[in-house]
Image: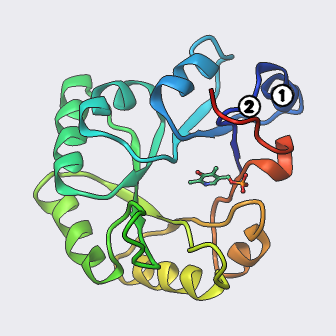
Amino acid sequence: MVAVSKTQPPERLAALLAAGQRVFGENRVQEAFAHWRDGPPGLELRLIGPLQTNKARDACGFFAVIETLDRPKLAEAIAREGQRLGRAPRLYVEVNTGEEPQKAGVRPGEADAFIARCRGEFGLAVEGLMCIPPQGEPPGPHFALTAKIAARNGLAKLSMGMSADFETAIRFGATSVRVGTALFGERPAPG
Ligand SMILES: *Cc1c(COP(=O)(O)O)cnc(C)c1O
């Protein structure tokens, strides 16, 4: 379980840490620094929000996992920073299963080619896929599609499911779920 700690105040983070949670998801690089720079050892921090190419260096140095790899320019930047640092974060390709124009992620029809390019051209070891189904649609078909793309590309990990639909996601093969409000309560407005 990835505890999604974006916009949560420190006392709520402390409560989850005290309960033994060590895997946390954040949407923004700067906020993740603020939350976790002085965190305890043994944390696994995951970037689950869109990553600008010019923040790839910071992200590669800080996160154990980047779940939002979705374009060649970003793959190139992550590969370059990985070389420089001598270590690369674990990577998930985000799939825009609903083909929503405002949402990040590769289109399902472009996923195979993109994964192949990440591996071949950029030498990146992609670990899994991530998806965020469209709001107001049954999520099952989106989870099924993501699982199918993962299977045919030899990817074992599936980051699928949030507070409202993690049980469905697990039925469709999620290996990690990203849960925010169901754990922490409603998020305060950002800023
Ligand atoms: C905020 C967020 C979540 C958590 O959402 P909840 O509904 O609060 O569980 C999960 N994944 C991503 C990508 C998010 O941005």
Q: Is residue 133 left or right of residue 92?
A: right
How has the structure been colored for display? rainbow
The image position of residue 111, as x and y in percent, is 30, 74
Give the number of marks. 2
Q: Mark 2 vs ligand 1: CB under 8 Å?
A: no
Residue at image coords 22%, 31%: 81
Residue 165, located in which quarter of the rendered image? bottom right
* Residue 168 position (above or below residue 182): below
Q: Is residue 2 left or right of residue 37?
A: right
The image position of residue 4, as x and y in percent, is 68, 43
Marks 1/2: CA–CA distance: 7 Å
* Residue 77 position (above or below residue 152): above
Whether tag 1 and tag 2 are in contact, CB under 8 A, the answer is yes
Residue 32, located in which quarter of the rendered image? top right
Residue at image coords 63%, 21%: 35
User: Residue 12 — which label?
Assistant: 1
The residue that disc 2 covers is 8
Q: Residues within 10 Å of mark 2 (few under 14, many from 20)?
A: some
